[in-house]
Every structure is written in C-alpha cells, then in structure tokens.
Amino acid sequence: MTRGAGVIDVRDLVVRRGRVLALNGVGFSTRPGAVTGLLGPSGCGKSTLMRAVVGVQVVTSGTVEVLGLPAGDRRLRDRVGYVTQASSVYDDLTVAENLQFFARVLGVHGGPSSEVDRCIDAVDLRAARDQVVSRLSGGQRSRVSLAVALLGTPELLVLDEPTVGLDPVLRRDLWAMFHALADAGTAVLVSSHVMDEAERCDRLLLMREGVLLADETPAELLARTGTTDVEAAFLALVEGPAA
Ligand SMILES: Nc1ncnc2c1ncn2[C@@H]1O[C@H](COP(=O)(O)OP(=O)(O)OP(=O)(O)O)[C@@H](O)[C@H]1O
C-alpha cells in the first residue's frame, strides 16, 4: 500500500437505489490496523456503503478508492475480503472443501492446503474441518464465510453484520478475532445495527438515513455528546438541538 494513503477513501458519495437516496454525501477514510464499526439502524445504508467499498454498487456521484485504486478494480480482487449477510458457501461441501474451492478460484498463492488450514484455524473451526456445511450451526456457518474472506490475507476485510443472530460468546470471540486481525495490520470494516457492539470498535462511523452522524472513537463520541453509551449518543445526535 502507498504510505500515507487511506485503506478506504470515500468522498461525497451519493447512491440512489430506485426512489431511495440510500447514501447522501458520505465521506470518510480508514487506516490499516483498526477495526472500524459502521453502525446505524436497519435501512440506513450500511450495506449500500459496503457494496460501494467493494465495488459492486452503482454510484450516482462521488468517489470510492480502496488501497489507492478505484473500488472494484481487478487488482483489488485478492486484497479485499468481503462477507455479505447471505451465506456464500456451498452447503454440500465440507468446510475444508469450500475453502479449497475458493482458494483455487481466487488463485491464492503460497500453497493452497496450508492456506486453507490457516484460515480454518483463524476462525476456530478446526474441529469441524471435515464436516459438511449443511450440518453446521448458524454460527459455524458464518465463520466458514469469514474463513473464505481470510484467504490470501487481504489488506481490507469488509464484513456486513457478521455477528447478527449469534450468541454472546460467539460474538465476543468474533470481535476478539477482528482485533487480532487488525493487530496483524488488516483494516477491518464491520457493520452492525446493535449499538452495544460499537464499544468494541477502535473507530465508529454512525449512520442514519444515508448520512454519517459521527466519525470518531467511541470515547470521543461519548465525550462530545455527554453520554455514557453509544445508544444514548446516537439519540442525542438525532434529537439534539436543531441547527
Ligand atoms: N435493491 C434495492 N432497490 C431499491 N432500494 C433498495 C435496494 N436495496 C436497498 N434499498 C434501500 O436502500 C436503503 C439502504 O439499504 P441498506 O440495505 O444499505 O441498509 P442497511 O443499513 O444495510 O440495512 P440492514 O441493516 O437492514 O441491512 C434502504 O432504504 C433500502 O430500502
């Protein structure tokens, strides 16, 4: 990566989806080695923003650059990992077979079999390595998608609501894993509509109706709004004194 450039650089981004203005002038940048949380209520535009970052969203105006290249550039294919809300793995293959398949598709370098096991270990699925995905629990299944996204050690991981529907222990473990990945230098962008997950992020992007309300650390957000939790901070920003 070019030194000094952001991992993600979004400027004046406007996206219309049908009649809806899904993003209305969004701008931010992220650096490597941090977990950035994209938080906001259902329908506020989180998935649309993530789709724009990975280059699968038609944008109305504005720019989105990733690692100094236009979002979706072919050269970013193995440098960006993306996990959507829908499972993207094959139910009739085992965990390891899924990983092997995607490693071949991505043309992952450095010996596919050791890379497959590295990613399975990273999401703590070694015990389920040879089980067929259809027999796994929901939480295990989302970890298989996550393992696929880790193939090739991407510099940016984009995770759309990866903890939705998971039990508290699994959620805690996944957040620990996001921080371990960030400590190893990966930039992690993770969305959630659960405000209490905000406190687990290094940095927060708070969003409402296609607009960013905040772009700061959780501590800065609480100090600025004079609140003690992110849910109250969100409400303070929404209901605060009219401009
Ligand atoms: N395919 C589509 N066509 C038209 N409008 C869409 C489409 N997908 C989403 N939208 C609209 O765009 C807006 C933003 O949706 P988006 O999925 O980005 O929100 P979100 O914050 O990710 O919500 P959730 O947490 O429920 O996934 C919403 O008003 C939604 O109804």
Image (cartoon, rainbow, N blue to C red):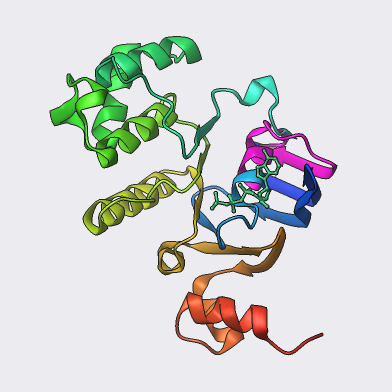
Instruction: In this rendered view, identify the residue nearer to me: 125 or 34.
Output: 125
Q: Residue furthest left?
A: 127
Please indicate, yes or no, whether residue 7 appears anywhere in the rendered image. Answer: no
Q: Position of residue 10 (x, y in %)?
A: 74, 48
Please indicate, yes or no, whether residue 59 appears anywhere in the rendered image. Answer: yes
* Image vertical order of residue 34 relative to residue 154, above or below: below
Q: Position of residue 138 (x, y in %)?
A: 28, 39
Question: Is residue 162 shown left or right of residue 138?
Answer: right
* Image vertical order of residue 88 relative to residue 174, above or below: above
Q: Position of residue 1 (x, y in %)?
A: 63, 35
Residue at 44 percent across and 14 percent down: it is 109
* Image vertical order of residue 4 relative to residue 157, above or below: below
Q: Quadrant of residue 80?
A: top right
The C terminus: image quadrant? bottom right
Q: Quadrant of residue 92?
A: top left
Q: Please state the total of marks drawn on the protein image.
A: 0
- Residue 64 magenta-drawn? yes
Question: Is residue 18 shown left or right of residue 218?
Answer: right
Q: Which residues are magenta?
A: 49-69
Q: Position of residue 62 (x, y in %)?
A: 84, 45
Q: Residue furthest right?
A: 61
Residue at 75 percent across and 41 percent down: it is 64
Question: Is residue 231 shown left or right of residue 183?
Answer: right
Question: Is residue 223 shown left or right of residue 26?
Answer: left
* Image vertical order of residue 10 relative to residue 142, above or below: below
